[in-house]
Amino acid sequence: MIEGDESLAGLLRQILEAEGHAIHDERDLAAAKRAMAEVEYEVVIIDTDLEDRGFDLPRLARAVRPFGGVVALTSSRQTSDRIAVLDAGADDCLMKPISVQELCARLRALGRRLGHPARAVLRVADLQLDRLERRVKRRGRAIELTPKEFALLEFLMCNPGAPLPRAAILQHVWNFGLEANTNLVDVYINYLRKKIDDTFGPKLIQTVRGVGYQVAGV
């Protein structure tokens, strides 16, 4: 999510997370482009009021991540402006002040069009994560996870085989910036390993030296 209004971004994050979405938000385009280049997001929500060239943001998002969804938020009341946003590559465009309930409904509809329901259940090797039921199983056996453990595992499984930097994990799961000095990621990775790997084996959660962590089938 690229939203310049901090209060609106916080509200959107709170409600979308309650809907079961994992959210990664940025305040500027440069940071968002770096994040999109590193992680496969299903939908990018863009504030077209972020800068003077705001109506070009959907086109820039498409250049970095061509196959995901793009939803634009705009304060413009001009039909021509909203058409320009859609022509630039946005799948949908909502006017501010937005109805968060409507945004959630639009995201569900976009997910159906893009085929995302097929990814409601994530699988890596014999590990399965159901994003709708919020359940995790390995070899058919249920694994109890805390909400943060679930969010961390979901983020890893959305990017199987891709090394995820600690900073990206912190931002995505805890909404901490790059300046955060914490070992939260390492602590929670250890929690996951005890539940996912140590009990079952072989090890699916792998350390990538100098980068961070990944989940990969063995």
Image (cartoon, grey):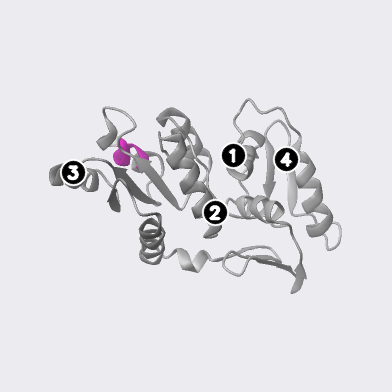
How far from the left and from the top, in percent, is residue 194?
Answer: 84, 54
Q: Position of residue 116 (x, y in %)?
A: 45, 63
Residue 43 image point, x, y percent: 43, 51
- Decide which of tag 2 and tag 4 comes sooner along the chain: 2
Q: Main secondary structure of the magenta part?
A: helix
| Residue 6 visible in image | yes
Q: Select label 2 or label 4 by which is in front.
A: 2
Q: Is residue 103 above or below residue 30?
A: below
Query: In the image, which disc is placed on residue 175?
Result: 1
Q: State the SS at label 3.
A: loop
User: Which residue is the site of mark 3?
Assistant: 77
Quarter location, residue 139: bottom right
Nearer the viewer's eye, disc 1 or disc 3? 3
Cα distance between the residues tagged 3 and 4? 43 Å
Residue for point 74% across, 60% down: 145
Residue shown at the point (33%, 37%) measured from the top left: 60
Mark 2 residue crowding within 10 angstroms, few (<14) / some (14–19) / many (20+): few
C-alpha separation, residue under disc 4 versus residue under disc 1? 12 Å
| Label disc, if present, on residue 17 of the rendered structure | 2
Q: CA distance from mark 2 to mark 4?
A: 19 Å
Find disc 4 in the rendering and name its residue: 185
